[in-house]
Amino acid sequence: MIFKKIDQIPSFLAGDHTVLKEVLHPDKDGLKIPYSLAQAKIEVGRASLPHALKSGELYLFLSGQGKIVVDQKEQLVEAGDLVFVPPGANQFVENTGNVALAFYCIVSPEWRPEEEEVF
């Protein structure tokens, strides 16, 4: 078993300018899982930079309101929404609400910095 408290996981600014907490990663947690899990936050009036991953990515929105743009297709999002972004898709997320936009990112296969291109 692995147990973590989300508020005790350090945050960092990712290459796409999203504030991330790396919750689970097979390399860092000694797990044999085919995915990584991160918690992301975008502050009011901010957006991630356009980027693409070689992996597929699933977003589960926890709080706030915003929009996600995937290969030039826009979708409004709010708490409880799920979005799958296919591998190689150009994407970004923007906070359009008045509180932080928070979401979980499940990346499969696991996220690796060399497999992400930021535009």
Image (tube, rainbow, N blue to C red):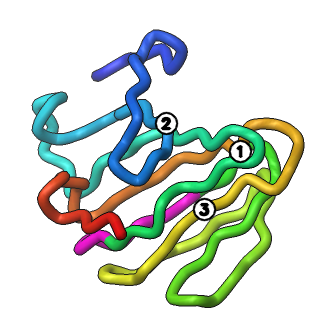
How far apart marks 1 and 2 lie (CA) works out to: 11 Å
* Quarter of the image where one finds residue 86: bottom left
Q: Which mark is residue 101?
A: 1
Q: Secondary structure at mark 2?
A: strand
- Dot placed on the residue nearer the N-terminal end, 1 or 2: 2
Q: Quadrant of the C terminus?
A: bottom left
- Residue 13 percent location from the top left of the image: 40, 35
Q: Is residue 94 above or below residue 23?
A: below
Tell me where the magenta segment starts and ends, as one range: 53-59
Inter-mark Cα distance, 2 to 3: 12 Å
Q: Position of residue 72 (x, y in %)?
A: 58, 89
Q: Which of 45 and 111 lies nearest the eye of the viewer?
A: 45
Q: Decide: marks 1, 2 in contact (CB < 8 A)?
A: no
In the shown orientation, is residue 6 left or right of residue 107? right
In the rendered image, residue 97, in percent from the top left (x then y), is placed at 86, 50
What residue is shown with label 2? 19
Q: Say if mark 3 contacts mark 1, CB within 8 Å.
A: yes
